[in-house]
Image: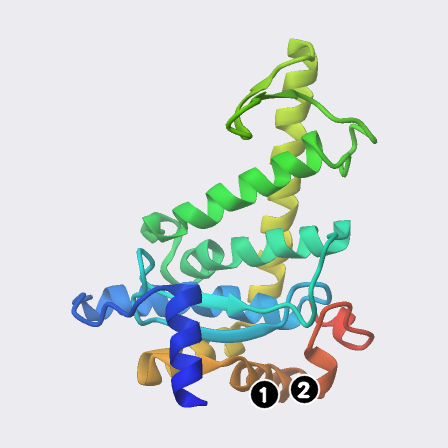
Amino acid sequence: MVDFEFAKDKVMMGAERRSLALSEEEKRVVAYHEAGHALIAAVLPNADPLHKVTIIPRGLALGLTQQLPAEDRYMHGKSYLQDELVVLMGGRLAEQIVFGEDHITTGAGNDLERATELSRKMVCEWGMSHLGPLTFGKREEAIFLGKEFARHQDYSEATAVEIDSEIKRLVETAFARAKEALMKHRPVLDKIADALLEREVLEGEEVYQMVSEHTGVPVDKLKGPGRPSPSTEIV
């Protein structure tokens, strides 16, 4: 099983790059960044269950927080997408809370890109915003290649401003929720980061145990998706 787990991690997260030498300060930043993602994934009621957290560089990433759904999904609910946005905000916010606004890093670049794209789809494709059950932008695809090249703007400039405003609102709401969660559970954030610095890899069960000890919520109640009360009251 150890070999299977190693192979799975290599396929899903990329090959380890242990030759990449990070300074102690950089390792600490990465540890808190991943701890932020992991902590929020562990306490939110609709996010995918936390599987593993590592600060060993893999692929192009300096660290990774891996979530695995409990079962195959073919549709995603609005509450799930909103919680995923909060998880994506966790890394940048952990850096900001621990090291200060002036010491945030470029490590959150991919998180912010994914959050922006997800919120754009919620507004423009899935009708999950204050703009109502509408879609915006007609796709232009190459017939023979079957590949999307561009999105045609079939709405007014005023609507474009509203779309941008809604995208910003969704991301800022997720940012505020992530900040509230990390500030409320700061002792667990420090504990997860310290454990990562010491051991480099944590299983999801270990993170859930840390959260359980801090909140008093049993581990089996912490695991999503759609976790019932009292876990919904944690954040």
Q: Is residue 156 left or right of residue 15?
A: right
The amino acid type found where label 2 is placed reads: Val
Name which residue type carries label 1.
Answer: Gln
Q: Position of residue 76 (x, y in %)?
A: 73, 52
Q: Return the x and y of residue 86 as percentages of the image width and height.
A: 61, 55
Q: Quadrant of residue 198?
A: bottom left
Q: Is residue 207 left or right of residue 8?
A: right
Q: Which residue is mark 2?
A: 219
Q: Are marks 2 and 1 in contact (CB under 8 Å)?
A: yes
> Where residue 214 appears, x then y in whole percent?
61, 84
Against 215, is 59 above or below? above
Residue 47: numbered disc: none
Give how far apart the Cα atoms at labels 2 and 1 are.
Answer: 6 Å
Count of numbered circles on the image: 2
Per the image, label 1 sits on a secondary structure element best described as helix
Left or right of 233 on screen, residue 114: left
Residue 87, quarter of the rendered image: bottom right
Q: Earlier in the sequence, mark 2 or mark 1?
A: 1
Q: Nearer the viewer, residue 114 or 24?
A: 114
The residue that label 1 is drawn on is 209
Pick whichever, 61 or 211, lies toward us.
61
Vertical arrangement, residue 179 with respect to residue 211, above or below: above
Residue 156 visible in the snapshot: yes
In the current view of this chain or complex, which residue is farthest to the front?
144
Residue 146: percent from left, percent from top: 55, 30
Taking 187 as reference, is 12 above or below it? above
Secondary structure under tag 2 reads helix
